[in-house]
Image: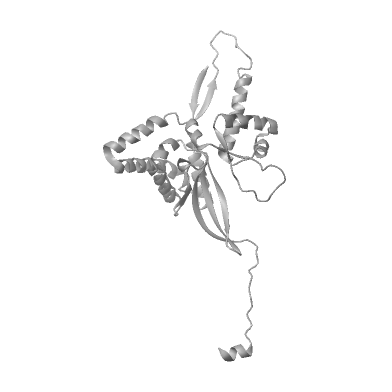
Amino acid sequence: MAVLRVLGETVVVYLEAPGTAPVDEAPVNVKDADRSTRDRVLRTVLEHGPITAAELGRRLGFTPAAVRRHLDRLEEDGLIGVKDVPQKRARAGRPARHYVVDPTAQVRLGNENGRMAVQAIHMLREMGGQEAVKAFAQRRAAEQEERYRDAVKDVPAGVERADALAAALSEDDYVAFTRVVDVSTGTHAMRSLQLCQAHCPVVDVAHDVPEICEAETEMFARLLDVDVRRLATMAAGGHVCTTHIPLGRDVDNGVPEKRTRITISKKQERTR
C-alpha cells in the first residue's frame, strides 16, 4: 500500500506483488469508506458553507441521519463549527444549524509545512526587516500572477474573467468560486461580484503575515483590470476569503419609481 498526497488530498494506492493473490477483493474496508464519506462531507462544507444538514444531504445524496452522524464527528474533531445566520423569516421550532469549516482547521487541510513556513518568515523579518517580508509577499504574488495570466488574458472582462480566475485558483487548491450580488438602491440594484476562496493553503502563514493577503488582492486587481476590495480573509477569522469585484451594472429590480406631485395654489404663487 502506498499513501500519496495530491493537492492536500490523501490517496491510498493498493499494490499487488507479482505472483501473489490479492489479499481482498475489496481493499477499502468499512472504516476507510466511512472516512472517505466524512471527507466528502467536510469538502462540501468547505465549498458551500454556511450550509445546513438538509442541504448537505441533498447535495451528497445522503439520508439526514447519515449526514448528522458525520457532522457530529467533524464537530467533535474541531474541523467544523456552527455559524449564526440570520433567518429570513421566523419558523416554528429550532432554527436550522449552519455549518462552516473552523478557521483553525484550515491548517489541517493540506498545510503540513505551515509551522516551518511561519518560522522561516519570522526569521526573514528579523534578518531583513518588514521590507524583506513585503518583498517576499509581492514576489510570491508575482509568480502566481504569471501562471494565472494565461488563464484570463483572452477571457472577456467581468463575470467570465472572474470565473476563469476562480478556476485557476482552484487548481492551486484554493477551492475558489464566484457569486453575483445585487445591492438594492430603491428602484434599481447595483450588480457586483464576489470572488470567494473556501480554502487557503497558506492560511497559517498569512495569519502572521497579512502582506500575503494584501499582495494577493493587488494581484486580483491587475488580472481583472478593475479596482477590487477585500471583504474578509480566513487569516483574520473569516470562514471564506471574499473579494468584492464591481461590475458597474445598474439593474432594474422591478420596483416602480415613487413620485410625489406637488401642486402650488394661486395664492402660494403670489406670495413666492
**Nearest the eye: 62 or 97:** 97
> What residue is rendered at 71% in x and 43% in y?
93
Q: In terms of depth relative to the viewer, which is nearer, 92 or 35?
A: 92
Residue at the front extreme? 93
Q: Is residue 240 left or right of residue 133?
A: right
Q: Is residue 173 left or right of residue 24?
A: left
Q: Position of residue 108 (x, y in %)?
A: 49, 30
Residue farthest toward the right in the current orientation of the protein: 92
Q: In this view of the protein, which residue sits in the foreground, 184 or 160?
A: 184
Residue at position x 63%, y 75% in the image? 260
Q: Residue at x 59, y 9 (%)?
A: 21
**Residue 26 placement: quadrant:** top right
- Identify the coloring: one colour
The answer to whether residue 7 is visible is no
Compared with residue 139, is residue 246 higher up or lower down, i.e. above or below? Answer: below
Image position, residue 192 (x, y; %): 53, 55
Vertical side of 1 occupied by 34: above or below = below
Rendered-image quadrant of the C terminus: bottom right
Q: Is residue 139 visible?
A: yes
Total numbered labels: 0
Locate residue 175, reporting x and y percent.
Answer: 52, 39
Image location (x, y in percent) of residue 256: 65, 67
Which of these two is toward me, 57 or 85? 85
